[in-house]
């Protein structure tokens, strides 16, 4: 995942907001994704944003996209202990079949 | 509905032994299939992907190989495992033109420990 970068770890208190950041490199990416991985499990698509959007809101999740800086963020409002997981951002390179994943951010929610 | 299965769930193998991990998808036709490896504390590394039976693209040179003997079956193999092959192996599928372009659906994973 050298093309997509994320911070490795984030710790927040239950009820606070969490913001997970990601930078990507391919300005032609059409979709950008956030996946969630719970301990010992596979990944599940959490949300996504199309490249012509700046923001997308989905219940407690808000995705912000800054195409100029190639910066993507995921905000989780009212973070719960069940949100503790690893969060991966990913981009599609052009018209390829391949997703390029970041290294993942481990979110720890403290009670 | 579509489901994806991987087995075994966990595997402990000695160095130099062979490997065969299997992934099957149900409820869809002609999926794109992917093998990823997740090393401890690291991100996902795409190992192989396949857009059809017998069509395999390798992303990273290594001692692993992949095969797709049937439309919805993807196998990851090795003739001789190395210590560095330890990790969490994830299989995924997608279809072009799906609800979200190239949304990938992941299996539960196989945790491989090479001793």
Image (cartoon, rainbow, N blue to C red):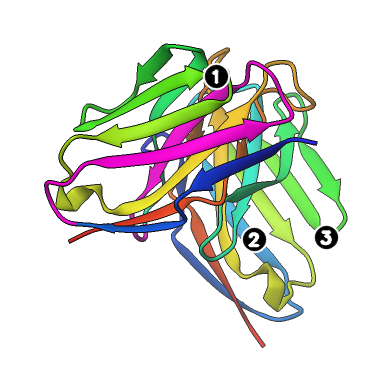
Does the rendering let one see residue A68?
no
Relative image position of residue B16 (x, y in whole percent): 11, 46
**Residue B25, located in which quarter of the rendered image?**
top right
Q: Label for residue A97?
A: 1
User: Circle 2 sits in a helix, a strand or a loop, which is it?
Assistant: strand
Q: Of B47 and A76, which appears nearest the observer?
A: B47
Pointer 3 or 2: first along the chain = 2
Residue drawn at x 55%, y 37% as measured from the top left: A90
- Outermost residue, bottom side: A111
The chain identifier of the residue carrying mark 2 reads: A
**Residue A81, located in which quarter of the rendered image?**
bottom right
- The crowding category of the residue bearing disc 3, from other C-alpha atoms within 10 Å (few below 14, some 14 to 19, many at least 20), is few
Relative image position of residue B65 (x, y in whole percent): 29, 27
What residue did someone put label 3 on? A60
> In this image, A32 relative to B69: left or right?
right
What residue did someone put label 2 on? A19
Please provide the residue range marked out in magenta.
B14-41
Gap in angstroms between the C-alphas marked 1 and 3: 30 Å
> In this image, A84 relative to B113: left or right?
right
Question: Magenta includes B26?
Answer: yes
Q: Marks 1 and 3: which is nearer the front?
A: 1
Pointer 1 or 2: first along the chain = 2
Q: Of A63 and B92, which appears nearest the observer?
A: B92
Q: Marks 3 and 2: which is nearer the front?
A: 3
> In this image, B67 relative to B71: left or right?
left
Residue drawn at x 51%, y 63% as measured from the top left: A40
Determine if marks 1 and 2 fall on one subunit: yes
User: Circle 1 sits in a helix, a strand or a loop, which is it?
Assistant: loop
Q: Of A75 and B45, which appears nearest the observer?
A: B45
The chain identifier of the residue carrying mark 1 reads: A
Gap in angstroms between the C-alphas marked 1 and 2: 28 Å
Quick check: A46 above or below A50? below
């Amino acid at each position: 995942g050298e093309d997509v970068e994320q911070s490795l770890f984030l710790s927040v208190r239950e009820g606070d907001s969490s913001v997970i950041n990601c930078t990507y490199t391919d300005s032609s990416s059409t979709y950008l994704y956030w996946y969630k991985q719970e301990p010992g499990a596979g990944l599940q698509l959490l949300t996504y944003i199309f490249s012509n959007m700046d923001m997308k809101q989905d219940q407690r999740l808000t995705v912000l996209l800054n195409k100029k800086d190639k910066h993507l963020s995921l905000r989780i409002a009212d973070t719960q202990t069940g949100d503790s997981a690893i969060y991966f951002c990913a981009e599609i390179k052009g018209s390829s079949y391949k997703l390029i994943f970041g290294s993942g951010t481990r979110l720890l929610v403290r009670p | 509905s579509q489901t994806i299965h991987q087995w075994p769930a966990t595997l402990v193998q000695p160095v130099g032994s062979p490997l065969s991990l299997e992934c099957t998808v149900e409820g869809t036709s002609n999926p794109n299939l992917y093998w990823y490896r997740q090393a401890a504390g690291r991100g996902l590394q795409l190992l192989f992907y396949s857009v059809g039976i017998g069509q395999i693209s390798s992303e990273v040179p290594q001692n692993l190989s992949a095969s797709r003997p049937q439309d919805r079956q993807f196998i990851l193999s090795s003739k001789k495992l190395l210590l560095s092959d330890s990790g969490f192996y994830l299989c995924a599928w997608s279809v072009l033109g799906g609800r979200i372009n190239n949304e990938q659906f992941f299996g539960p994973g196989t945790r491989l420990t090479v001793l």
